[in-house]
Amino acid sequence: MKVDMADRSTFEELKDTVVEYLLRECRGADTKQQQSNANGGLGVVYLMGESFGGILATEVALELNRPAYRDYVELRGLILVNPATSYLRSTLYELGPPIANDQWGGKTQYVFSLMTKLVPLFLDQGRAIKQLIGILTSKGLPAVVNNPQREAYMGRVAFDLPNRLTFMPKDTLKWRLEEWLEWGCGIFEDRLEMLQSALDSSNTDPSGDVDTYALLKVSQDLRTMIIVGELDLTLPSWEESNRLCSELFRNTYVHVVPGAGHASTCGGSLNLISLLREVFPEVNMHGGSNNYDGNRNGNWATAGVEVEPMEELHGLEPRYDGAWIGLNPLLYWSKDYYRKWRK
């Protein structure tokens, strides 16, 4: 889900928007399929949130575990990528608010501060640049780009980057740091205290308190995967994964992406589909698969194609088709790889 730069929704409004969307999808997106599946009409959901989205996803998970939603949604898994539940202990918290609250510097000073102080926090040690070179020279692709349709989509996004890469206005930065990150972290810490109180009290009746009931369900039962970048400078993500495992989630799988910074954790270094299948084996991924899914190195070696060693691809995988050149950009918008959505 994407949020516009001009959006000034509160944290609660964002949570409600996500919950309403999920309920709408689970109730009416495909009623016949829901009624015929093995879940008795329940909509099965795997919820994923990255950075601030990790705070939001955790709160949405609590909401979906309230008794009011048990007849509509079955939340089977939670995936958190560099969750910003650690924002109040992060470098971003130290550097971000002074930049957002600077009343004397003009736009030039603001952009300079962004580029020299905040943007470097989201990068890695040149890994993303090396991956980009590998993609442009057709040596490798992100693991998820395993067929022509997905390569065409990646190409269309690349062509649209000039329209997407705009500086975040100062008032937007201020709103998101204060009203989303700081406020969301405050709510999260309150939840942890509430959970600890419930665990410490032998007289607590969770069935009589919907908040406590939801907390205990998420803490004890919900399968949770936490993915962290090894070189995340924005947030102390590795430390936070340990804290979340010890204080909140009891059914947890932690995966560290080597060499990844905050913004590149879910990039070319991670085969997210493969990891999801490993942690949630019941997931059945429809579409997008091809004959080269799986051990592509072995497939292409037997076909007589020389494969680049994985360390030389900096986390990418060999091209799905073994070609020496990428898909023709003229095909990015062809009828085979692109369909315009009409409301």
Image (tube, rainbow, N blue to C red):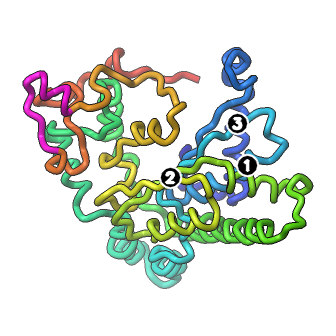
Give the class, few, some or many, for how many residues have Cα within 10 Å of label 2's Cα (few <14, many ≥20). Answer: some
Identify residue type, mark 1.
Asp
Query: In the image, is residue 68 part of the stretch drawn in magenta?
Result: no
Q: Residue at x 63, y 68 (%)?
A: 185
Query: In the image, is residue 302 part of the stretch drawn in magenta?
Result: yes
Q: CA distance from mark 1 to mark 3?
A: 17 Å
- Residue 60 appears in the rendering: no
- Residue 187 picture location, percent across and down: 70, 67
- Residue 205 picture location, percent across and down: 89, 59
Residue 317 quadrant: top left
Q: Secondary structure at mark 2?
A: strand
Residue 101 quadrant: bottom right
Tag count in the figure? Answer: 3
Q: Label for residue 16?
A: 1
Q: Earlier in the sequence, mark 2 or mark 1?
A: 1
Identify residue type, mark 2.
Tyr
Give the class, few, some or many, for how many residues have Cα within 10 Å of label 3's Cα (few <14, many ≥20). Answer: some
Q: Is residue 60 left or right of residue 71?
A: left
- Residue 177 appears in the rendering: yes
Residue 1 quadrant: top right
List the residue tagged with mark 3. 74
Q: Secondary structure at mark 3?
A: strand
Give the class, few, some or many, for how many residues have Cα within 10 Å of label 1's Cα (few <14, many ≥20). Answer: some
Q: Which residues are magenta?
A: 297-309
Q: Secondary structure at mark 1?
A: helix
Q: Is residue 20 left or right of residue 168?
A: right
List the residue tagged with mark 2. 253
Q: Residue at x 25, y 48 (%)?
A: 315
Q: Is residue 67 above or below residue 5?
A: above
- Residue 291 picture location, percent across and down: 29, 20
